[in-house]
Image (cartoon, helix red, strand yellow):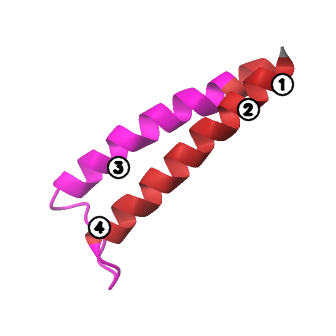
Amino acid sequence: MLRSFGKSLQLLALVILPVAMVIQLSREMRATTEVSDLSVMLIFLVFGAAMFGLGRIMEGYAR
């Protein structure tokens, strides 16, 4: 169970990163807040990398 959850986190992280790139490139989906577009992209990057790492650790402990 823990191994499959870890794999799911890894796959979700690998989906989030390209979606963040598409959002960055799309004009109509850009953030309308005062936060710059680059900081939103960096938040997605850090969140995706942390989620992938957490999934990898969980998968490793499940073995």
List x then y, in percent, for residue 38. 29, 67
**Amino acid type assigned to the residue bearing label 1 in the image:** Tyr
Front: mark 2 or 3:
2
Mark 2 packing: few (<14 Cα in 10 Å), some, or many (20+)? some
Tell me the number on the disc at residue 61. 1
The magenta segment: 7-36
Tell me the number on the disc at residue 20. 3
Element type at mark 4: helix
Q: In which quadrant of the rendered view does residue 39 lie?
A: bottom left
Determine whether, in the image, residue 11 is placed left or right of residue 25.
right
Determine whether, in the image, residue 6 is placed left or right of residue 19.
right
Quadrant of the snapshot with the C terminus: top right
**Amino acid type assigned to the residue bearing label 2 in the image:** Ile
List x then y, in percent, for residue 33. 34, 81
Residue ID at (54%, 53%): 47
Q: Which of the marked residues, 4 or 3, is nearer the chain's N terminus?
A: 3
Front: mark 3 or 1:
1
Q: Which of the marked residues, 2 or 3, is nearer the chain's N terminus?
A: 3
Element type at mark 1: helix
* Residue corresponding to mark 4: 38
